[in-house]
Every structure is written in C-alpha cells, then in structure tokens.
Image: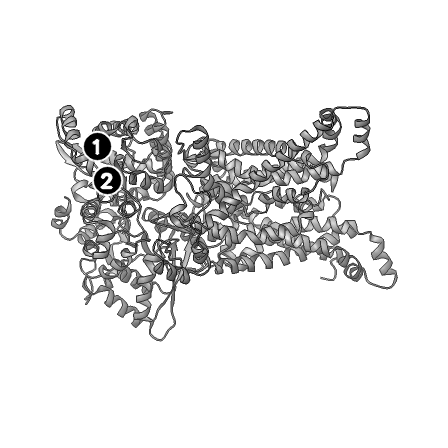
Amino acid sequence: MREQKTWQTVLKRTAVIVAAVFAFFPIYWLISTSFKPFDEWANWPPIWLTDNPTLQNYRIVFFPDLAREFAAQQEGSLDYKVSGSAWNAFKGSAIVSVAATIISVAFGTLAAYSIVRFKTGGKNYPFQFLTVRMVPPIAVVVPMVVLFSILKLSDTYFGLILAYSAFTLPFSIWMIRSFIDDVPAELEGAAMIHGMGQFRAFLTVTLPLVKGGILSTALFIFILNWSEFLFALVLTAGNVVTVTLQVANYVSASSGKLYGVQAAMGTISTIPVIVFGYMIQRHIVRGLTFGAIKR
Amino acid sequence: MNRIPFNIRLVLPAQLTIMAIVVVPTVILLWLAHTDWQPTQNIPWFDAEFYWFWNFYDLWYDERFINSVFRTLFVVATCIAVELFLALGLALLFLDEWPWRKVAVSIIILPMMIIPVDAANAFFMLFNERGPINHLITVITGEVFEFSWLSHPTWAMVPIMLAEIWQWTPLMFLLVLTGLMNLPENQIRAAVGLGASPARIFFRVMLPLLVPVISIAVVIRAIETFKIFDPVYILTRGQPGGATETISMYMYNGAFVYFRMGYIAAAALLVLFVVVSVCLVLAKPLRKHG
Amino acid sequence: MSKKSIVTDRSRRKFMQSAAVGATAAVIAPSFIMSPRMANAATLGNVHIEAAKKAKELATGRNITLKVLQPSGSLGNVKPVADQFTALTGVAVEYLEVPLGEITQKILLEAVAKSGAFDLALPATFGMPDLVESGILVNLDQYASKYEPEGFQDDALFSTGDYYKGSLYGYQTDGDTYVMFYNKDWLENSDENKKFADKNGYELKVPDTWEELDAMMAHFHRPDKGMYGGALFRTQYFLAWEWWVRFHAKGFFPLDDNLNPQINNAAGVEALEEMVAASKHLYPGARTNGLFENFEAFGAGDKFCNIGWGGTQKFLNSDKSSIKGRMAFGPTPGGIVDGKLLRTPYFNWGWNYVVSSVSAEPEIAYLLTLYACSPAMSTVAVRDPDGYFDPFRGAHYEDDAIIKTYSPEFLEVHKASMEGSIPDLYLKGQGEYFDELRTNLGAADAETKTAKQALDDTAKSWERITRRMGKRSQGVQWSFLKSIYPSSIRNRLK
C-alpha cells in the first residue's frame, strides 16, 4: 500500500515537471534567442543554447548608436539601422497604460461604490458593463477609426488612453465591486452616526480597507493595457508607438524577421507583466472572472 | 448637476466613457453597415451611398466570412476542451501540500503572464521550418523534417491553437484549482470513508461540485477565445488564402487590407448582435455568483 | 532587349504624356500635362542640388520638419539621403516607422483621419491605385512640370507605377523586378549537356522560354541523388507572381478592353497546368517555404534554378551562401508568340515615394522626393546593404559599392529586366484581385480544383470586384495602364 503510494507520488511529481517544462519552454526559447548572434537565429539544426552569447540584440533595442559602433568594430555582428531606440515605445506604453489605468480604476471605484451601496440601476445594471468586454474589439474598431478622425484623436496618446479606459472599465468595476462587497456596510453606518457624510464615510472607512484590492485591480488593468495590441495597431500611425507594436518593427530586407531583436524586445517588454502578475497572483483569478471566483 | 442624484453622479464618469467609446461607435456602425463606404472612394463616411441590406445579403454568400465563423467556433470548442482537460488533470496534481508546490504553481502559470504578442512570436520561432519543433521531430523520426507549419492551409491552425492553449491553460488551471480547494472537505472525506475508489470520488463527488466553477471558467474563456486575434495576426495573418482567418482576422483583413469598411461594418454589426445575445444567455453562471 | 525600343519611342516621359492624354481625355482635363515645361536649370546630373536649393528658398525663415512614414527596415535607405537634405536646406526630417505590411493601411487611414501625421510616405507600388483614389496622394504633375529635369523619368528604368490615370503620383525608388538564378556548374557540365541535348534536341543554356525551363528542371530533378530541379515558390502568396509571368508570356493581357477577365482563356489554363506540372520538379520545401527559407534553400547549391529579386541576390552573393560566384542569371523565361520570343519580366513590388495631400508643405516634401530619387542621391540610398532598395536608375549600375553587393553579372540581367518589366495589376482593389487569384491558384496547385475551374472562379470573382469598384473608373485606369506597358510587349499582347 505504502509502496503504491510512493510510486504514485513519483508519477505525480514527474507529471508536474513535464507540465512545468512545457510551460517554460517557449519562454526559454524567447530568452535564449534574444542572446543569439544573428547567424544562429534560423540555423539548421536549430541552436538550443548558443555558445556565442551576445548582447547585440539588446543593444539594438535600447542603444542603437552603441550597437552600430559595436557592429563596426566586431566582424560578423548585426548592424541594423532602426530609427530610434525602443525607449519611445516604452514611453508610449507607459504613458498610455498608466493614464488609462488611473482613469479606469478611479471611475471604476466610484461606479462600484455606487452599485454596491446604492444598488444603482438595479440588479441588472452591472451586466451592461460586462457586455462591453464580450464584444470583440474588432467589431468596434471600424467605427472607432471614423469617430477618432472626427475628434482628431487618431494616433494620439489621448485617443488610445480613452479606448483602453473604456475597454478595461468592466474589469475594474466588477473587481472593485467584489472587494467593496466584502466590507460590511455597517462599518460605514457606524462612521455616519458620528456625523460623517456617506461619501466621506466611504473614503475614510471602506477605501482604506479595500486599498489592497484596488491596487491589485490597478496592476491587473495595467497588465491588460500594456499587453494590448489590436487597438494600438489600428488607432496609431507611427507617432504613438507601444511595446507590442515595436516588436513588429524589427525586420530587415537582408535578414527578414529579426528574430533575436524581436526576442530581446519581447523579453524586456514582458518583464513588467510578469512582475506585476506575480504580485497580484492571488487576485488574478478574481480579475479574469470579473470577481465571480474569489480565492 | 445638483439635481442628479448622488449615486447616479458616481456612475456617470464610467458610464460616459463607455458611451463615448462603445455606444457612439455602435451608432456609427449602424449607419456604415448600410452603406458601401470605402475610404478609397474619396468621400466622407457620412456621404456614402445608402446600400439597404445588400451587405448582409453579400455576407450570407461570402464563403470566406462563413468559413471564418465556423473556424472560430471550432477554435473555441477545441481550445476550451483541451484547456479544461489539461487544467483538470493538472489541478489534481496539486491537491495535497508538498514542498516546492508553490514554486511549481508559479512556473505553470507563467505563460499567462506573457504579453500575447510575444508569446505568439515565441511560437512563430518554435514552429519555424528550422525551429526546435521540427528539429525534435527530425531527431525522433530520424528523417529531416522541414515542414512549414505556418504556410500550410490545414496545419497552420495547429500552432495558432497551441499558442492559445499554452497561454490560457494556466488560467483554467488556476480556476479549477481554486474550485477544488474550496470544495467542502467533509463530503470527500465521507466518500473516502465509505471506501470509494479515487476515480469514483473524482467523477461522482468532486466533478459535480465543480460544475459552477467550471461553467464560469468555460464561459469566460469562450468569450475571450472567440475574439482571438493576436496569435493569428502574428503567426499567419489569416494566410494562406484566408485558411486561418478567424472572425477577428477576417474583419481586420476586410477593413484594413481591402478597405471595405461598410461591408465589414455589416459583419461587425452581425457579430455584435449575435455575441451580445449569446453572452446574455451564457452570462447566467456569472450572474448567479455575482 | 527592350531598351532600344524604349529609346526609339521618343522619350518615354513624353510618350506617357501622350498616352495619358489619349486615355483620360474624356475624364480628366489634361491641362497641366500638356503645358510646356517651365524653364528649369536642373539636369539629371545636378537635379539634387537644384532641388535642395529650391527647398531652401521655400523654407527660408521658417522651421520646417518633414515627417516620413516608412516601412520598418527601410531607414538605412532613407536616412543617409535625408541627412544630406537637412544639411543643405535646414529642413529637418523625422521618421515614423510602421510594420512592413501595414504601410498602405496607415496611409489610407490618414485619408480618413486627415491628421497631417506625415508629409511623405513610402508605400508599396501596387498599393498606389487605392491611395490615389482615396485622395491622400498629391497629384505631382504641377511640381514635376516645375522642377523635374528633362529625362528624369526616362532614366528611371521602371516608372509605370508612378502614374495613375495619366498623372504622376510618386517616384519609384526600388527596383523589384523578378529575375532567375541558375546553378552555373550544372548548366556548364558537359555530361549533363549531352544527356539533355540527346533527349530534347537543344543544349543546356539559360532558358529563353518556360517550356525550356520546365524541361531543364525535369532533367535535373533527381531527389534520390539529392539534386532538385528548382526552388521556385509554391506558397500561395508567391504563386500568383510566377503564374502572372507565365500567362503574359503566352501573349495576353489579364483583362480585355471591356475589363472582362482573359485569365481563364486557353492560354491561362495552359500556363496554370504547366506551372502545376512543374511543381513536381521542385525541392520538397517549395510548397511551404517563404522568402527567407527560399534564399537559404537555393544557397545550399543542390538546386538547378530559383526565382527572386535583388534582395535574393544580396543573400546569395554573401558569404552565407555556398553558391556564391557559381550562378548564372537570366530574365524570367518568356514564350513563343506568333513565332517570335516574347519576354515579360515582371515588376511585382517596389517602394514608391509619395506626398501626403494633408501635408502643410507639399512642395518641399515633393522636393525631398525629387532629391532622394535623383541619380546621385538614390545611388547613396541603394548602396545600403541592409535596406530594401534595389537598383532602379542607370547610375546605380555603375556604382562600385552596388556592383560589389550584387555582382556585375547579376546587374546586367537585372537592368535589362527592369527596362522591360510588365507592371502589376495597378487597379483600385489590387489586393482583392490578387488574393482571389492566389487562393485559386493555390487550390489548383494542391489539385483540389482543376486549372480551368480555378481560373473560372477567379474570373467570376474579378468581375464582381470590378463591378463593385466601378467599372467605368477601373476602365479608365486599365486603358491607361495598358498604354504604358513597355511598348515592345504591349504591341504583342492581345
């Protein structure tokens, strides 16, 4: 009996290891490619771990001028004339993601509070927000192009911020709603007895209690904004660049897709997502299920 | 302003933002869908010729559109079935406490923390003709295998679906695991006490108790998978010849490669209508929990 | 080859003007096309200096920044030239990079948004008709008559795509014509030559016709010995291009004068059947490999022939390729029409400098395109080994750096092909016409449709697309486009 149990345990742990390998392998390939010199990107047989690791791909991403100097000195390293460094893309993504997150969470908190404490709009009201999330973005992109051309918002930070805010609002409303729901209304009631207005009671009593939840929501929304691709692709035209767009910019006539540089850009740009993702690991389930499943 | 009740004022910012970016475009969409507007006509969108319902008539006979709809449904069904199966299996491995358990969970959920575009790029490299997948097959079979997955009309769907499954099985896993951990222990203990086999316990006791969680997970993943765009765009763009076009990709190509804005607006309207109605039905499990 | 006929054709530019008048007289008032060229000090040799001078005059006392929208990866071609322009004129240049495949879309969205986001752009030439129709491109006739020196467009080896319905809308800045690559060792092997001659009655050579090429591919295809007939593309995206050449070489235009598709006539079906038959003599990766894989496959040296562009040669002539220096080159094969050889090399991509109609400084933007496409400056642009631009002007073929990159043998063939290239289907909706063709050719190649069926289906879709685009408007451009096919080819096509 015990032997069978040990045997089972070994099998189970092996299965976990296999799963972990599958989960990690594509990421490994991304990272390992980012350190490969250009003649190893599409080698046959493929190079699983390079013997000649190089930082040139990262240099091209962040310091194109340095990269060109390096290429001039070092025979056989990639010389690529990108217009600017990826800083512009990081700047663009940061501006858009942060601003849209703040708007989404601020508006979301107010709405969530109203929905929880005042039952605003009745039982079905929150669901109309969810509908927004169910709509495939591509279905509203065509009229958005038209709308943005009327409002002169095409290829502007503000335009993208507006789009991101609207499309993440369902998440922030529902997530924050589930956090506020956890705080008993009586606490606010007690504060009100001491003469506080209702909204002040919310700000001074409930808000501090759900601040962790709101922060998690913010990080969660930030991740969504940072990773967004379709809106960025359609609503910008070169002035505003995001990290997801920048990846596609690394191509050249003589080498086709610059796998290594794309991988370097991909590795760096995904780091914030991973860091924030683990920070809110506990809440990710709640977020992605609109607060329906809590941990 | 003061006449508006306080609680309404609180929801106004959110409501107005959504109106501006969702409702207004939908109204524009309603107009565009009944025109044949193309930017290449060099007329403003509001001057476009009214087209009655011809766009919808054309869509009905547009094989590419119909195929993309069925292809999308196929992708949704397949991906979710595989994700659910893998997630259930994985979650069962994590029921008991063991050292490194947390680390293992962290590694397994890593894929869902990767920017989808980058994940798609990784899969682009993996399934390159000279990529590691073909290399593995070469090593195993002993015959050089230089197959270009992404330009094959049938097989190109495989890397796309694998990318999607790879990225979102972790979420499904987390959901199922959460559900499993929250199961009432006494019922399971009772079943164990009665001497039921583990398989019996799983199918007769645990699975029925998991149904609410699983249905939420499936609904949410179905909604998200239905929109699938990033991996398709990065891996194939719907090539070859539309053989990998999902609804989103079809609409992107129609609107931004062929510039048939009016026509695609009609498709969008149709999709919008169907999705919203279906979702209102599907959202029931969410509603119960909410 | 066709060079003589073009030269004897008066000047090409003048010829085009007269063609334009003929084609569009009913629709477009050809006032400035016919107006005499203004007195202009510029010559081919100093046009860049003159253009910079004029730009400086126009910009005097103002701070002007021109924004260039370009496909990512072309900066190496654009920046060195723009830097010199800035130094000469004080006009700053900024770059907006968008992914390669998105550039037409971005320009078109600008036609809707009219935000003035960029002043110049570099779309692919086949996207020009859509862009012109959208109203986002400046009609350059007025500026050309003011600044373009005599013979400026004659010196550009392919400029068909610069014109639409009789007017100038851009300057071709990349020579993307289809060229053939052959394994010279195999071609010159005397044993092979004897064996081949015994069977076919003529000796191995750079083939003149598709029939000869197909015979040679069949001859060399011995997969059991690791030898393959060819590395021609068989992925759907590329398939249409090979068929386009095979079809034209049979002596037909794709559309007749009333825009009825001719692609599904007997010649079209035959061309497709021959192409499908030739698929048997290609290496196994052909059906699935894209551009980059194609270079490498041919670079391995175990295939008889390949098709490609200047970029292909950049790779094959580098140290990465084991076939470097052991290649023969040729124009795309032709066909025998009315007892005479007809060659129809094909210009199927290429980047084109255009000016945005929303630009605040269209005239200075135009001067920058004139500057960048001038013989002297475009040589600097084409020199960049990582860029997209391939030679497209006479001067490029004499530049040492360019000769070194491409090799003299290649450039000779490339130049001849450029001079006599047939254009793509430069009609509004080009993308739709071609995707329809691609899908059906792919089905024929996969043998899920017969050749006849595939082309009939394409023809039916084409008729629908034409109706939707407006038959009359398409007709104007089609008769214009036909009139600017290289005359040596035009006169022989039905």
Q: Earlier in the sequence, mark 2 or mark 1?
A: 2
Q: Quadrant of the C terminus of chain C?
A: top left
How much space separates mark 2 and mark 1, taking CA atoms? 10 Å
Query: Please, is residue A104 above or below residue C227 in the view?
Result: below
Q: Which residue is mark 1?
A: C213
Q: Chain of mark 1?
A: C
Q: Residues within 10 Å of mark 1 (few under 14, many from 20)?
A: many
Which x, y percent locates residue A195? 86, 64
Say whether residue B11 is left or right of residue C211. Answer: right
Helix, strand or loop at mark 2: strand
Say whether residue B181 is left or right of residue C335. Answer: right
Q: Amino acid at mark 1?
A: Leu
Q: Residues within 10 Å of mark 2 (few under 14, many from 20)?
A: many
Image quadrant assignment for residue C79:
bottom left
Q: Which residue is mark 2?
A: C180
Which x, y percent locates residue C95? 40, 60
Query: Please, is residue C11 above or below residue B141 in the view?
Result: below
Residue A226's disc number: none
Badges 2 and 1: C-beta atoms under 8 Å apart? yes
